[in-house]
Image (spheres, rainbow, N blue to C red):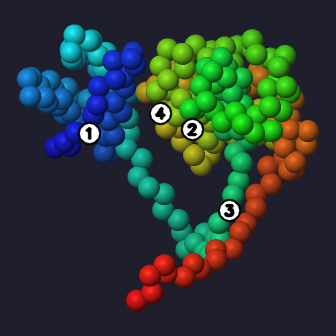
Amino acid sequence: MKNNSWTLAPEAKPDVYLVDLMGGKSHTVTFLTDVDSKSFEVEIGKSYDFNIVWDDQICFTRLTGQAFVPAAVFDSYFEAKNRGKILVEIPEVYELVNVAIALTSFGQENRNFIYHDSPYYTKVLDHFAAHLDHPFVTTLDSLLAGNSGRYPRLKMNGNAFVFDENDKIISSPITTALDSVKIDPTDCVLIYNLCNHFPMLSIFDPSIVKTPKFTPTTFPIIPIPPMFPR
């Protein structure tokens, strides 16, 4: 039992609880309060909607089953090659999604989600000013305006896509989306389809950022002495 693992958010419509299913097998999930309880046999790729009445407010809640993805396991070659290093990269599609979110009315009005006080933010707005009404931007805006809880999922799902040799966005061979396309196609297919039609104008143009397009940088790990010696 997971005590206090869920809080009500009546402003979210719906408020989604993602259920990780080990081995893709169905699992019984029970919402238990001091008043009542409700159980669902959750299956992968399926959603279950119900309402919770709290303090005269109706909280629209949704359970969605998704496959449990275990932590990454690296082979000995990878470990030996990268031991003692920190690799900093800028995933291009992830940055593109963040740029598009910054262009939305939601992004421009919410400083808690988008950092506004940087030269980069100002240059992005200027560079893409002619594309504020692009379907990719307006669709993102409508999704975020309806439920701000979508923000982390929408931006992080950008990591599940990469540019191929023809600069077309395809699914990443390494990273999977936070939500499987089979489970929540709205977010993932949105990125996959609309990103390909968004005028790139090179988001890594030197006029926007002063680094070459997608340049990984490796930093050595510097030992830090203990704060309190033994």
Q: Kindly indicate the quadrant of the structure image that contains residue 61.
A: top left
Give the mark, 3 or 2, whose residue is nearer the N terminus: 3
Give the mark, 1 or 2, whose residue is nearer the N terminus: 1
Location of residue 204 in the rendering, given as x and y in whole percent from the top left corner? 83, 41
Residue type indicated by callout 2? Met
Q: Secondary structure at mark 1?
A: loop
Instruction: From the image, tell me which residue sits under label 4.
Output: 179
Q: On the picture, is 137 further left or further right than 44?
A: right
As rendered, which of 45 and 215 lies closer to the eye?
215
Quarter of the figure with the N terminus: top left
Q: CA distance from mark 4 to mark 2?
A: 10 Å
Residue 186 is tagged as none
Instruction: From the image, tell me which residue sits under label 1.
Output: 5
Label 1 crowd bin: few (<14), some (14–19), many (20+), radius 10 Å: few
Residue lying farthest to the left in this orientation: 35
Give the mark, 3 or 4, whose residue is nearer the N terminus: 3
Q: Nearer the viewer, mark 3 or mark 1?
A: 1
Q: On the picture, is 96 further left or further right than 180?
A: right
- Dots 3 and 1: beta carbons under 8 Å? no
Quarter of the figure with the C terminus: bottom left
Residue 87 is tagged as 3
Q: CA distance from mark 3 to mark 4?
A: 26 Å
Give the mark, 4 or 1, whose residue is nearer the N terminus: 1
Q: Secondary structure at mark 4?
A: loop
Residue lying farthest to the bottom in this orientation: 230
Q: Secondary structure at mark 3?
A: strand
Residue type indicated by callout 1? Ser
Give the mark, 4 or 2, whose residue is nearer the N terminus: 2
Label 3 crowd bin: few (<14), some (14–19), many (20+), radius 10 Å: few
Please name the residue shown 70% across and 33% down the image.
Answer: 116
